[in-house]
Image (cartoon, grey):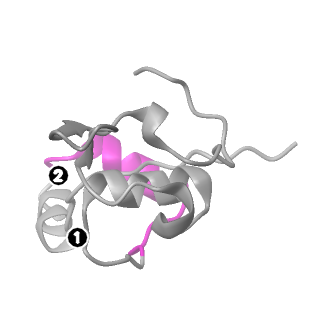
Amino acid sequence: MNRLLLIGWDAADWKVIHPLLDSGQMPNLARLIAGGVHGNLATIYPALSPMLWTSIATGKRPYKHGIHGFSEPLPDGSGVRPITLLSRKTTGGLRIPLSH
């Protein structure tokens, strides 16, 4: 069975990372890149982390998984609360631990 390790680095920018790699300041990342592949990921907008990571984890767009930002309305409409894994309307396509 082939294995895949997907490393996602929120807000990372190759314009910042490449000079650090070139100057030898990130040897472990350089080793990972040398032994694999790397590149830019296409994104969806607005580029909000909870929405994007949930799309990666589920393979579904926000209108299907239900995560559109950092918070969601309370069921009674009295305010908002932070989103959690339980806020998703669908299961993930990947096996992802419930905690980190």
Residue 27 in magenta stretch:
yes
Q: Mark 2 points at which residue?
A: 24
In this view, the residue in front, 8 or 28, is: 8
Nearer mark to the viewer, of 2 and 1: 1
Q: Earlier in the sequence, mark 2 or mark 1?
A: 1
**Is 68 positioned to the left or the right of 14 in the image?**
right
Whether residue 80 is situated above or below residue 64 in the rendered picture: above
Q: Which residue is drawn at 55% across and 50% down?
A: 57
Against 5, residue 43 (above or below) is below
Give the percent coordinates (x, y) of residue 43: 38, 76
Q: Which amino acid does label 2 sit on?
A: Gly
Element under disc 1: helix
The answer to whether residue 65 is magenta is no
Residue at 38% in and 61% down: 52
Quarter occupied by the N terminus: top right
* Along the viewing direction, whichever of 100 and 62 lies nearer the viewer: 62
Mark 2 element type: loop
Spatial distance from mark 2 to mark 1, Cα to Cα?
15 Å
Q: Is residue 26 rendered to the left or right of residue 9? A: left
Q: Label 1: which residue?
A: 14
Decide which of 35, 39 is in the foreground and name it.
39
Instruction: Name which residue type carries label 1.
Output: Trp
> Which residue is at a point 33% across and 47% down the rendered structure image?
29
Kindly indicate whether the residue at mark 1 contacts the one at mark 2 (C-beta within 8 angstroms). Answer: no
Examine the image and state in which quarter residue 47 appears: bottom left
Quarter containing the C terminus? top left
Q: Residue 17, located in which quarter of the rendered image?
A: bottom left
Q: Give the range drawn in magenta.
A: 25-41
Q: Where is residue 39 in the image (x, y as percent from the top left)?
A: 42, 73
Please name the residue shown 26% across and 53% down the image. 10
Q: Which residue sits furthest top?
A: 99
Q: How crowded is mark 1: few (under 14 residues within 10 Å), some or many (20 or more)?
A: few
